[in-house]
Image (cartoon, rainbow, N blue to C red):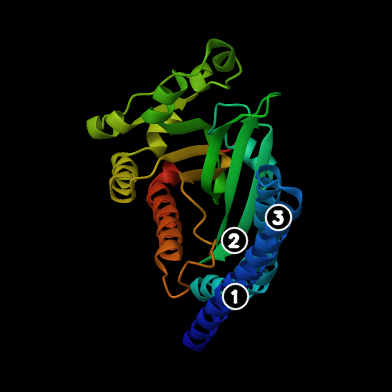
Amino acid sequence: MANDLKSLDRERRKVIHQSVWFGLVLLLAIGIIVFILFIYLDMIAAPLVICLALLAYCWALIVERLAKKYHKDYQDNVLKKLVEFVDKDLSYHPSGGIPEYFFKQSVLFRRIHNRYEGKNLVCGKIDALPITSSHLRAKRNNVEGWGISIFVGLMFIVEFNKPVAGKTVVIPKMEIQESSFLSFPLRMMEKWHDCDPIIKTDHCEFEKHYVTHGNSVKSTRSLLRPEVLQAILDFTIKQQRNLFLSFLDSKMYVAISDSDPFSTGLFSNPLDFKPIQRYFEYLSFCIRLNNIVHSDVSSNIQTH
């Protein structure tokens, strides 16, 4: 893979070099056109604005076309290999995403959305544990065109062996505080978890960061034992990210607010693995959380 990375870095530098040259050529061409208009037509302001806009548009199209092959090579030669290295039963699909149905089914986000996008899907099994993840973007646009971001980040879905009795939802307190600043009509459109009662845990530090809702006190407390709560808290402190968690039917849903660790720009060094390392840390946390829950869950899970 080292050779692939070096080759990709050379390709990236080549694309940047070509983009700069195309930009300079376009800028020179626009300058000549503006100069001619100024000399012969004695007009400069309007044509200059139009020409600059045209320059920016053409340059963006050229850069996008030049970078397309680089991005595909990075996905095929680096990301796919890294994912398959973790477990041969995992597969990576750049254009795939978690279906919107599961995003809604997770009941993690109270605000109604009308725009949804998923990409960089990873799915399969790790040590026979079915797991799916992708980067998601959900927002709500109104008729005027401005929008509210509902969620931008990674979602992980881990399959349980048996259905979980009841519903358990853990959301950051910050999410609730932010909702209080919305106008009354917007709050009326929210999908609140308050239909399920708040269930207090015995972990004081956890209560400072999170609120737990559920429709079965017994089931919620059997799932959110002190070891699980501490693992969530440790993750929050280490990563400094908002974490959303729910247990519903036979699935554990984990959503983490973050930028897309799989995306790479022309000015990002392909030898820098910090973003993708962050993704694997999230993945490891989900597997660890599942193992902690399952360590004593057999005596607390009820089948339907």
Tell me which label, 2 or 1, sits earlier in the chain. Answer: 1
- Which disc is residue 15 wearing? 1
The image position of residue 176, as x and y in percent, is 42, 24
**Residue 97 appears anywhere in the view:** no
Disc 1 to disc 3, C-alpha distance: 36 Å
The image position of residue 263, as x and y in percent, is 55, 61
Asked whether 233 or 189 is in front, the reply is 189
Residue at 28% x, 47% y is 234
Tell me which label, 3 or 2, sits earlier in the chain. Answer: 3
Residue at 67% x, 25% y is 142
Residue at 53% x, 20% y is 192
Q: Residues within 10 Å of mark 3 (few under 14, many from 20)?
A: few
Q: Quadrant of residue 184?
A: top right
Q: Which residue is mark 3?
A: 39
Q: Nearer the viewer, mark 3 or mark 2?
A: 3
Q: Residue reaching furthest top?
A: 184
Q: Residue reaching furthest left?
A: 204
Q: Mark 3 and 2 residues: CB-CB less than 8 Å, in contact? A: no
Residue type at mark 2? Val
Tell me which label, 1 or 3, sits earlier in the chain. Answer: 1
Residue type at mark 3? Ile
Q: Which residue is mark 2?
A: 122
Q: As displayed, is residue 238 above or below residue 243?
A: below
